[in-house]
Amino acid sequence: MRVTVLSYCETEADVAAHRYDPVVAQVGEALRAGGHHVAVLGVHGSLPQMLRGLERQRPDLVFNLAEMFGSNVTGDVALIGVLELLDLAYTGCSVGEAYLTQDKALGKKLLAFHNILFPRFAIFSKANNLETGGNLRLPLFVKPAHMDASIGIDKAGIVRDANALMRRVLAIHEECNDDALAEEYIEGRELYVSVLGPSDGEPRALPAIEIDFSGLPQGAPHVMDARAKFDTKSAAFRGTRARLAELPDELRAKVQAVALGAYRALRVRDYGRVDMRVNASGEIYVLEVNAACYLERSAEFAMAASAAGLAYTEIIQQIADMALARGKHHERRGTPLATRKNGHARANRAGRARTRHHRRAR
Ligand SMILES: Nc1ncnc2c1ncn2[C@@H]1O[C@H](COP(=O)(O)OP(=O)(O)O)[C@@H](O)[C@H]1O
Ligand SMILES: [Mg+2]
């Protein structure tokens, strides 16, 4: 079967030079090990170029690793829409579902319906509308409402009074061109729980990964900001590391249940990662749900899978199989199985068997 690994490149020059994130080669290799013909398609901001590439490669499946489009950080949602209109089978969320995890405030509203705990919050929109669900207790953590990969995340995001709050809100409006989300700051352990599977079936929660902040200088706030994630030379990067969480049985069961609940509530499919904090009283707060989290071999998802006894090639192939089993867009709408292409029928028989954290955790 022909699989196209679709990847976002930071510049058109990277596209031309075939310079991709390391995850691209890793996913490609895992798919080849499964007997697939793999091609890579790099895209920055040119839709015609992407369409030509897909036309040329004619994939049976797109393994979608695209995280944005051009300079549009939420462009990956629209990009999924293109795959859908082209009637291609692809990994990860479909277009409507993908938006749910990108809009952090909307996501919380969905979690509320499912009684899943999250930090109480207020939204300060660019249009200067204020939306809040109740009284908020300081300190607050202020971040952009739609970004990820720690864009706009900074330890200066922790605010302890109204002046600091308003300064930070304005900075996010101006620097990130986004609405500002102010959340109660949750002091406690930071856990990432990866999930593999369909949200409407039986997704599986993998062992929790914990961010160990103990290498940070005394008194430094425990926040996974952009430095801690990506700036390999910084004290924040060197002082934080992801490791398998050691949790008492009861807490382990609870965090996995919360992760599955959040994954389902936001309709993530194939794979994702739920970021949470556990405070001193053992209350579990969901900070963020990442659909299609970073699949790099040493990143949290693969680390958790490995702790569950799942080899890297195995998870990549499972994700591909799930997407194929779901089939193309129109097939979901009811084309009989018998008329499907061989590849799809085979994938179906083979068993039914996507923070998004760029580079390090995304
Ligand atoms: N309400 C909060 N309380 C405590 N820490 C937070 C809170 N929100 C975010 N953080 C810190 O900031 C990091 C990034 O926030 P997150 O919402 O996950 O954004 P991103 O999408 O950029 O990963 C978290 O991993 C955590 O360390
Ligand atoms: Mg995060």
Image (cartoon, rainbow, N blue to C red):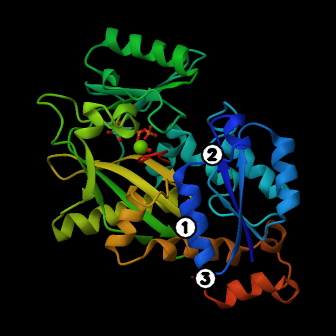
Counting residues from the N terminus, which is met first, the one under dot 1 or under dot 3? 1
**Vertical side of 29 occupied by 349: above or below:** below
Q: Tell me the mark number nearer the camera, choosing from 2 and 3.
A: 2
**Tags 2 and 3 in contact by the CB under 8 Å rule?**
no
Counting residues from the N terminus, which is met first, the one under dot 2 or under dot 3? 2
**Could you tell me the amino acid type at mark 3?**
Arg
Q: Which residue is mark 1?
A: 199
Q: Which residue is mark 3?
A: 352
In the shown orientation, is residue 345 left or right of residue 66?
Answer: right
Q: CA distance from mark 1 to mark 3?
A: 13 Å
Question: Who is closer to the viewer here, 203 or 63?
Answer: 63
**Could you tell me the amino acid type at mark 1?**
Ser
**Figure quadrant, ligand 2:** top left
**Could you tell me the amino acid type at mark 2?**
Arg
Residue 111 position within the rendered picture, expressed as x and y whole percent measured from the top left? 46, 50
Q: Which mark is residue 259?
A: none
Residue in the image at 18% along x and 53% along y: 282
Residue 330 position within the rendered picture, expressed as x and y whole percent measured from the top left? 84, 69
Q: Which residue is mark 2?
A: 19
Q: Residue furthest left?
A: 218
Q: CA distance from mark 2 to mark 3?
A: 33 Å
